[in-house]
Image (cartoon, rainbow, N blue to C red):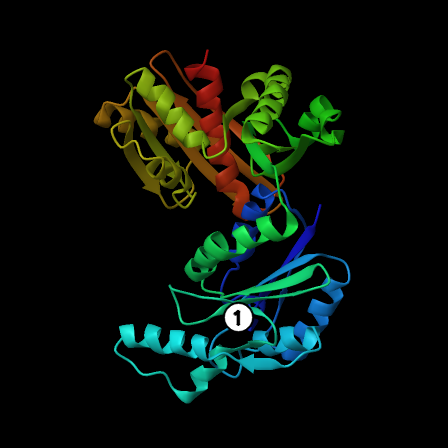
Amino acid sequence: MPTAEIITIGTEILLGEIVDTNSAWLARKLRDLNLNIFRTATVGDNAERIVEILRETLARTDIIITTGGLGPTVDDPTREAVALAFGRPTEYRPELWQQVVERMARFGRTPGENQKRQAYIPQGGIALTNPVGTAPAFIVAENGKCVISLPGVPREMEYLAENEVFPYLRRTYNLSGLIKARVLHTAGMGESVIDEKIGDLESLANPTVGLAAHAGAVDIRITAKAETEENADQMIAALEADLRQRLGSIIYGADEETLESVVLRLLAAQNARLSVVEANSGGELTRRLSAAGLPQIFAGGKIISEQISVAALLGALQAECAASGAEYGLGLTAHPTAGNLEVDLALISPARAWTETHGYGGHPKSLAGWGATSLLNNLRQKILTV
């Protein structure tokens, strides 16, 4: 099976001025093509460094996809760098220049002489027409290996990848089968405890199981390689059933589901509403519940900027529920004192009300998120799914 690596090109990425989303998108798509992605890397707009990383990567992998550096300015050196990496010059392609002229005409503009740089690609390369932008892309192939250079603008990159690059890779490397992933979301149990319960599954070769810890939650990723999507689904389903049997109710959802959306759906099933009061948390709980998209269930609430006591939190929550007519209430106060991080949690249901105080050993900036996750999970496990 061929291997692939992704190289994003742009000094603005190295300086943290923009976030590289292209690598994540490409990695997911290449995974679905059943390609093994071994590395991703970022390099600035420097021709010598691009040549160096390309030669180094070509020595160990079959397919390199680059994004960025195909614009018309002097600091867009990808074309020249790829040509140098293969030991060949660039060549002018009149049809690519015509493409640039036509694209600019749509904006009522005439391209400047510097934009002719975009009509040059490495000698012998395959030009990829870009109908959604002015930067032509290209493929250079040699001895079973190839470099595919795409624009850095995400929408242009995605269009060319879907319509030109992926079909090329399927044809050239006789790609068959696919890699499919499913992510199970858990809350209420630490990563190390989960690892003890499912560690034997984490050593499987296909499908594979991996863990990713977050503040108050742990994701379990199942990845299967198969010839058909149906076969992959069957492999994933069998392993998921095993995981659910071992872990039980700590699994609250899968893939795009969020804890807050699951909680709101459980409330909707009871025809009940929810109000919140949170203090010194930056509105973390309100933000997450609002984003879940069930305004008829989430009645909103009160955000207090300063710390308050747990008794004051419960009293404010009771008043908020009474005012909104909500049957359930969640209260959160963060106490981010260095060396003694704590959260106060309050929960109101039609049957009872309770409060808890929990210590936290992570970063202070994660305290509110961890507290919100703990509180939502308490409502889900202790009341809504009893």
Residue with the mark numbered 1? 12
Query: Can residue 135 be seen in the rendering of this structure?
Result: yes
Task: Judge from the rendering whether residue 190 lies leftward or rightward of residue 278; answer left or right.
Answer: right
User: Disc 1 on helix, strand or loop?
Assistant: helix
Relative height, residue 328 to residue 3 (above, below): above
Identify the image quadrant of the N terminus: top right
Could you tell me residue 116's position as x and y percent?
45, 83
- Nearer to us in this view, 187 or 83: 83
Q: Quadrant of residue 79?
A: bottom right
- Nearer to us in this view, 99 or 310: 99
Could you tell me residue 180's position as x and y percent?
58, 35
Residue under the image location 57 percent in, 31 percent down: 228
Relative height, residue 273 to residue 74 (above, below): above
Q: Amino acid at mark 1?
A: Glu
Q: Quadrant of residue 90?
A: bottom right
Residue under the image location 27 percent in, 23 percent down: 326
Number of numbered discs present? Answer: 1
Query: Can residue 188 be seen in the rendering of this structure?
Result: no
- Nearer to us in this view, 371 or 173: 173
Task: Judge from the rendering whether residue 43 lies leftward or rightward of residue 266; answer left or right.
Answer: right
Could you tell me residue 386's position as x and y percent?
46, 11
Relative height, residue 288 to residue 162 (above, below): above
Could you tell me residue 224's position as x and y percent?
63, 32
Q: Give the class, few, some or many, for how many residues have Cα within 10 Å of label 1's Cα (few <14, many ≥20).
A: some
